[in-house]
Amino acid sequence: MRALTLLALTATMAGTLTVSGCASDQEKWCDRVSAAAPTLGKTLDEGGAKTGLIDALPTLRSLADAAPSDVREDWSTLVDAVSGLADAVAAKDDKATRQAGLKLASPDVQAAANAVDQEARDVCHAGLF
């Protein structure tokens, strides 16, 4: 009986240590958001609407890759639009750049940007934009 009690106690302690040693998915996500928010804000402030978004693209992609499932589609919409702008600017194609700018200003992309920012504020208490 004593051995059984000791075994149960050991299993309980091991489970407690395992649970307390691992951050939840939400905590990991919020850590990423909190780490990225200042850099993202600075990049957007310094670069302005067009250049800032392009410069922020690696950070946006990193966040999109780690985003929770409930906002993953919104992240994809936003990153795809910014990627389109980056491609058009790199190609020095004025017409494509204007079209990419219009896409970024579209209701769908604006709604996606608002959704990812609101999710970061609600869940992680950190605004992205």
Image (spheres, grey):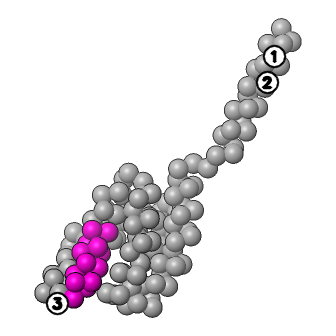
Residue pointed to by mark 1: 5
Residues drawn in magenta: 78-92
Q: Are marks 1 and 2 in contact (CB under 8 Å)?
A: yes
Q: Is residue 121 magenta?
A: no
Residue 19 x, y percent position in the rendering: 66, 40
Question: Helix, strand or loop at disc 2?
Answer: helix
Residue 15 x, y percent position in the rendering: 69, 32
Mark 1 burial class by Cα count in 10 Å: few <14, some 14-19, many 20+:
few
- Compute the Cα span from label 1 to label 2: 6 Å
Q: Are marks 2 and 3 in contact (CB under 8 Å)?
A: no
Mark 3 burial class by Cα count in 10 Å: few <14, some 14-19, many 20+:
few
- Type of residue at label 3? Asp
Please say if 33 is above or below 21: below
Question: Helix, strand or loop at disc 3?
Answer: helix
Left or right of 21? Residue 1 is right
Residue pointed to by mark 2: 9
State the residue at coordinates (32%, 69%): 79
Question: In which image quadrant can residue 78 be found?
Answer: bottom left
Left or right of 55? Residue 109 is left
Main SS, magenta residues: helix
Q: Quadrant of the N terminus?
A: top right
Tag shown at residue 94: 3
Q: Is residue 87 magenta?
A: yes
Residue 69 x, y percent position in the rendering: 38, 51
Mark nearer the viewer, 1 or 3:
3
Precedes in sequence: disc 1 or disc 3? 1
